[in-house]
Amino acid sequence: MADMMQFDLVSPEKRLASFPASSVQIPGADGDLTAMPGHSPVITTLRPGVVRVQSAEGDKSFVVTSGFVEVTAASVSVIAERAHAGDQVRKDDLSDLLEEARSKAASAEADQKDGAEKFVADLVQLLEDME
């Protein structure tokens, strides 16, 4: 099992995935990264995007909005605020989140404005990529 690592994805509502994976592509807030078995330990925040997982059963994708990822040499744990199986999510599922994010960005204090606007931009990009 040296060429596999444990992949887990949870959200507040449920556990979406738990299985061995050979690689996991992560939309990190500071840039995308691919974790593979033996990866150096890292913790990063998520930006809205798609987590892509390669496993013995084939490729799977999951749409996430925000959260955290812990990568170790033997595992990837994604804790997402909101997450959907990639083949089960529609743009409409995220439209309320986008409107809420736009509202928060419009009323954000100056020291939080850039982060709020970046979140909106990342959500818009995710929705465009879903077309």
Image (cartoon, helix red, strand yellow):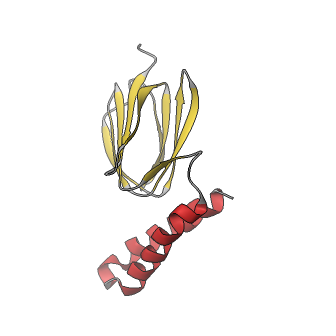
- Choose between 55 and 35: the one closer to the eye: 55
Question: Position of 34 compared to 68: left or right?
Answer: right
Q: Residue at x 31, y 51 (%)?
A: 12
- Choose between 27 and 39: the one closer to the eye: 27
Question: Position of 7 compared to 23: left or right?
Answer: left
Relative to 78, say whether 28 is above or below: below
The location of residue 126, given as percent across then percent down, is 57, 60
- Choose between 48 and 32: the one closer to the eye: 48
Q: Residue at x 53, y 62 (%)?
A: 93
Quarter of the image holding residue 30?
bottom left
The location of residue 35, given as percent across then percent down, is 44, 34
Question: Position of 76 compared to 22: left or right?
Answer: left
The location of residue 20, given as percent across then percent down, is 43, 24
Q: Residue at x 38, y 71 (%)?
A: 115
- Quarter of the image with the N terminus is top left
Relative to 69, say whether 8 is above or below: above
